[in-house]
Image: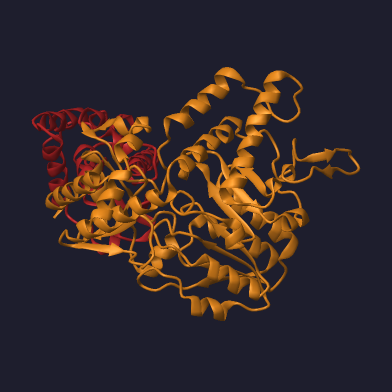
Chain colours: A orange, B red
Amino acid sequence: MEAVKEKIQAYNVTALRNKFPVLNVKVNRHPLVYLDNAATTQKPESVIKALESYYKNYNANIHRGIHHLAEKATVAFEETRTEVQKFLNAAHREEIILTKGTTESINLVASSWGRKNLKENDEVIISTMEHHSNIVPWQLICEEKKAKLKVIPISDEGELDLEAFRSLLSPKTKMVSVVHVSNSLGTINPVEEIIEMAHAAGAVVLIDGAQSTAHLKIDVARMNCDFFALSAHKVYGPTGVGVLYGKKEILEEMPPYQGGGEMIGEVKFEKTTYNELPYKFEAGTPNIAGVIAFREALFFLNANNHTLIHEHEQRLLEYATKKISSVDGIRLIGTAKSKIGVISFLLNGAHPQDVGVLLDQQGIAVRTGHHCTQPLMTRLGIPGTVRASLAMYNTHEEIDLLTEALLKAKKMLL
Amino acid sequence: MIEPLSIGKIEQEIIDDFSLFDNWEEKYEYIIDMGKKLPPLDDIHKKEENIIKGCQSTVWLVAEQKDGRIYFKADSDAVIVKGLISLLIRVLSGQTATDILETKLDFINKIGMMQHLAQTRSNGLLSMIKQMKHYALAFNTVAS
């Protein structure tokens, strides 16, 4: 008990909260309780300042300019790439492709890698708990190539059925694309095991890390995935910035995704040659300010002890699960053994949207609906859920407020 | 036959009702109560062609024309949306096509419910108002 107390004290959540300006706003005359972190996290002051500083002090287009501002912006932009490489423990910096977000990262792979490597009757495996952005890009390319999409089933608790996965694998399997952490359920999938099994079958693996990166230590070298996709805005960074990590030898063999400026070597009307990695995949002027500010988000994460963050979030998850399920008529959705701080639930007799509206009236931001995982909701036989999702700055008091607000909503609705 | 109240007069009645509420709880309790009291739509009307799709809640809407006036019936699986639907029906059902097409439904803003009409896909309410006006336009065209 003493050790736990010490740890709670070591984790200074008040000091942390002070770094996020938006956490001080009031919503409907209540202090904001922000529990929609799986949709997007709030941004620390340093990230906001970096965005402003770029536009105020050195706004310029990157890579080809010879003037001072262009040079400064280019250096700052490329420093983010290096920082991401370190953060993910990638072997080479050119393995880091900067994109708009996880959705674009997955589309890039499905389109470029898929076009080159998939043929008729090949198989792509995804899972029942995928976000639409890890379903639809594969459907598009599978339809085009007459390849087949196979789906790993899940248990009622929301865990992948690895035995079923094993039986889906065959020499026809060319790609396995699965989510690291489920956005709707919080389930942490055993990706290292999945990657090993997929590699043994000769398949390439993409891990959708949109929900895991802010909460788990990511090491692509250890994980040994072939691709890893993430969004900056779910990791305390700006919107409109994402990362695609890919193994160099695979990326090099892939054709460009989009054509335009930046991605070319030499353009002639007879034939255009393409730029080298990573620029081959970065056509057009990127979100320069966002990329530069993303580095501050990574600094911010690195400056805080990762283990302490994880332990804090796990303590909160345990507390929230207990408190919310103590409300009569609550049904938790997603009870996997290994979870991040996502609590999805239903209140018997009430539509999730009604619960969400009444929580909002009390200053509490949650998400309601199918969370862009309609096939998962169909599998669970529900139209959607109310989802509270936690981040490093949430507190036990906020969980108490959520529980009280939930009791009030229940009284009003039922 | 008694002439029904004009849209403007009904809107004012609702605004007056809402001005009596001291806090958000009273306001939402009233809307929830309205939602619960709105007669459910017969199952025969709950078919695909009558659905107004929102991202989260579903709204069903049917309309008929009688003696130059349009009558609406509607339902939803979410009770707050249903309460707001009940207000819309109170204002628009039984009015003429011309009046329905012309009204701006200012009362929604005045009772502080504008957030439910935001341009998000979360509920079918905005689409429902559009659909009510479409019905009015269609009946109007047929009539002339």
Q: Is residue A159 above or below residue A231?
A: below
Residue A396 position, x and y percent, is: 24, 47
Query: Is A279 left or right of B126, judged from the image as shown?
Result: right
Residue A188 position, x and y percent, is: 43, 62
Residue B1 in view here? no
Front residue of A55 and A406: A55
Q: Residue at x 13, y 55 (%)?
A: A414
Residue B65 position, x and y percent, is: 28, 46
Front residue of B74 and B72: B74
Query: Is A152 left or right of B57, judged from the image as shown?
Result: right
Q: How many marks?
A: 0
Q: Is residue A253 above or below residue B30?
A: below
Q: Residue at x 62, y 64 (%)?
A: A205
Which residue occupies the extreme right position in the image?
A: A270
Task: Tell me the quarter of the image containing the N terminus of chain A.
Answer: bottom left
Image quarter for residue A393?
Answer: top left
